[in-house]
Image: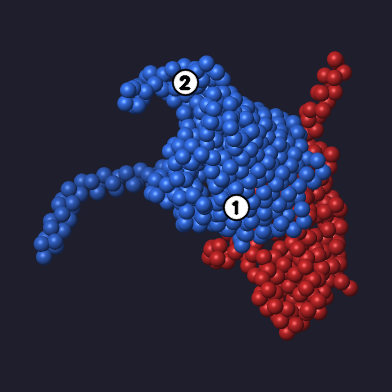
Chain colours: A blue, B red
Amino acid sequence: MVKKTVLSLVCSGALFAGNTEVEQLKQQMAQLQQQLEQMQQHIAALEAQAPKEATAQEESLESMEKTATSSVTTLLPDIALILNGGYTSRNVSNIKYANASIPGFIDAGAMEVPYNAKDGFNLNYAEVAMSSTVDPYLDASAIFHIHGDGGVEIEEAYFVTRALDYGFRFKAGKFKSAFGRVNEKHHHAWNFEDQELINNALFGPDGLGGAGAQLQWVAPTPLYLMAGFELFNGNPNQGFSAKESASTAVGYLKTSTDVGDATLLAGLSYAQGKSEVQNLDGLGDPIPDSFTDYGQTRVYGADLTLEYPLADYGQLIWQNEWMQRDKDIERMTQKQSGYYSELLYKIDENWATGIRYDDIYQNRTGDPLTSINHLHRSSVKLEYKPFEFSRFRLQYNQDHSKYIDDQAKTIHEVMLNYTLELGAHGAHAF
Amino acid sequence: MKKILIALLCSLPIFASVHVAAAYPYIGELVKTVAGDKAEVSVIASASSDPHFVTPRPSYIGILRSSDLLILNGGGLEIGWIPPLLAQANNAKIIQGSEGYLDLSKYVKMIDKPASLSRAQGDVHAEGNPHYALDPHIMPTLAKVIMLKLSAIDPSNKSVYHANYDAFAKHWSDKLKQWDAAMAPCRNTEVVQYHELFNYFFNRYGIRTAATIEPLPGISPSSKHTMEVITQIRSEKIPLIVQDDYHEPKTAQFIAEKSGAKAVVLAHDAGNGSLDIWFDSLVAQTCPR
C-alpha cells in the first residue's frame, strides 16, 4: 500500500517536471531526424561516385576465416593446478633428519626440506600457476606453492617481453635463474623427486634466483646460441651477501646442435656476488647495516646433455652438470666442487626409468670436518604415467652426503610420489 | 680477409626473399608449391613422429629465430610443443597476433568438436579434430590461404604466388577427381583406427570409424578394450584396421590376427614425397582395387 502511494507520487512528480523536457526532446529528435536524412543523401552520393572496386576485390584472408568468432571464449588467464605428494620411508627419524647438515654447505638445523620431509605420508604442495598475455608487449606468469603445512610461497611472479627486436627478451620480477641446466625447472619438472645434490648444497631447494631482472639474446643463426645476463639481490641462502643491493650477477651461454637424430645441449654459466657476512651482536642477533666484507663469491658451471629418440615415444637422455664455488672468507678462499650425472631411459608413453650419481668431490672450507669425507649420493627411479598429465614415481636414494650429530650418516630412503597436472597445460621446454 | 667477409655476407639470408617455418611437412610442401624458389622453407616436425608430441629441440629455435613467417596447423595440435619454442625464439615477427603468424585451422571448418570438455574423456581437443589436412578437398583452401599470406608479406612476388597457386588448384582438382573415383567403391564401409587421426579422410569418403584401438584419446590400449574391439570386428565384419606409424604396431597386429581384419599403417603427413604421393598411397591402402 505504502509502496504504491510512493510510486504514484514519484510518477506524477516526474510528469510535472517532464512537460517542458518532453517538448525539448521532441525538438531534438526532429533535429536528429533531419541530420540523418542529410547523411543518408550524402552516403548515397558518395556511393554513386565510388568505383566498383570494393565488390570486385579478390578474396582476402579475413573473408576466408571460419572460426574467428568461436575460438576466443574468455580473457581469463590460463590456470593450472599441480598436486604433488607421496609416501616416504627412511632410516632416520624425522627430528634427526630435520637437523641433518651438509658439512661446508648447510649447517645443522638450517636445512630446508620442502619435499618429502617426513617419514610417512607427505603432501608436498598444491601449485597454482597462472599466466596470460598482458598486452601486445608483455606476458606475465605467477606460480604459487601452497605447502602441506599451510605455508604459501610465491615461487615465481614475473613479466616477459613478447616482441623486442633483434632477438632480445627481457624478464623482471621474482624468478629462477637460467644458470646451468636444471636450476630454472620447477619441482614437478625435475627428473628425480629430489634436487641434484650440488644444486641443493650451493643454492638451496629454490635454486639460484629471487627478485631480479634478466636479459636474454638468441643469435640469428641456424645453430642455437643463447646468451643471458641476470641481476639479483644477494641471498645468503644461495651463498651471496645479505646486504640489500642488486649485487649478484649471473651470465650464461647455451648452445645446441643436432647430430643425426641425437641432440646435444651444452652450456657455460657464471655467477658472482659479494661474500659479505652480516655481523652479530653478543646475543647472536644480526646487527642492522653491519657487514664484514670478505670479498667475492664466484660460481662456475658447465653442463652437457645428450638426447636420443627411440621408437614408440622412447628416449634416452644423458645429462651432466658440474659446478664450483670459490668463496672468499676470512684469510682464505673456500673451494667447493661437485657434479651429477644422470641416465634417463623413457621406455614408451607410460614407463620410464633412470639412475643418477651425485658427487661433491672437493670441499675445502678451512673446517677440518668437511675435508674428511667426500659427499655423494646414488639414486634410481621407476616412473609410470597412465596419462599425459599424471605420473607415479618410485625412487630409492643411498645418501652419503648428510651428517647427523656431527657424524657421517648413510641415509637410505624410498619415496613413492604422485604428480598430477590439472587445467591449462603449459608445454615444457627441452 | 675480404673473401671471408664476402663469404659471411653471402651466407646471411639477405638474398632469399621470405623465410618460412612450417610446423608440419604437408605445410612445407604447400609452401614449396605456392612459393617455388621465392621462399626458403624449414619444416619443424617430421612425418614419422606424433604431431601432438614433437620433442622440442633447441635447433627449432634457430629456425624460428630467423623466420619471417610461421605457419601452424593450429586447432591445438601444436599446443604441447610450439609455445615454449616460440617464446624462446625471441622473434617479434612471428609471435601470435603478428603478420608473420599464420594458423591454418582458422580457415577450416573443424569436425568432432566435443559437446563438453573433461579429461575424463582422455586427451580431447577442445577446438575439434585438428587433423583436417587428411581431407584432400581441404588442400586447395590451405594453398590459397598460404598464397594470400605470402602475397601480403612479400608483395613484390605476388604474381608468382598467384600463378603457382592457379597451377596447383588446376592440378589438384584433376587429382581429386581420380581419388574420389577410386574411393567410391568403399563408401559405407567401416574401419577401426588407433587414434581418430584419419577422420577427415574417412568422413570425406563415407567410411565410418567403428572403434578405436586406444580406449580414449591419449590412453594406451588395455587388454579389456582390445578384446572388445576384436569381438566388434568379428561381429560387424569390419575389413580394415588403420594406424599411424608412431604408435606401437603390436596391438593392431594382434587384433588383425585374432579378428581376420587387415592392418595397415597409413602416413598421417606428407613424408619424403609430394602431396600427390601421400594421398595416392592413402587411397591405395584404404580402398584397394
The answer to whether A317 is drawn above or below residue A266 in the figure is below
The answer to whether A138 is drawn above or below residue B176 in the figure is above
Q: Position of residue B123 (x, y in %)?
A: 61, 61
Find the distance from the CA under tag 1 to the CA under tag 2: 38 Å
Identity of the residue drawn at 23% across and 46% down: A21
Query: Circle 2: is it few (<14), some (14-19), or many (20+) Cα within 10 Å?
Result: many
Q: Report the front residue among A416 and B165.
A: A416
Secondary structure of the residue carrying tag 1 is strand
Q: Report the front residue among B45 and A4.
A: B45
Residue with the mark numbered 1: A396
Q: Position of residue A330 (x, y in %)?
A: 50, 18
The amino acid type found where label 1 is placed reads Tyr
The numbered disc on residue B1 is none
Does residue A173 appear anywhere in the picture?
A: no
- Which image quadrant: the N terminus of chain A? bottom left
Identity of the residue drawn at 35% across and 26% down: A284
Residue with the mark numbered 2: A276
- Which image quadrant: the C terminus of chain A? top right
The amino acid type found where label 2 is placed reads Glu
Query: Circle 1: is it few (<14), some (14-19), or many (20+) Cα within 10 Å?
Result: many
Q: Position of residue A375 (x, y in %)?
A: 60, 37
Q: Report the front residue among A231 and A149.
A: A149
The answer to whether A182 is drawn above or below residue B231 in the figure is above
Q: Position of residue B154 (x, y in %)?
A: 74, 36
Q: Report the front residue among A124 and A35.
A: A124
The answer to whether A29 is drawn above or below residue A249 in the figure is below
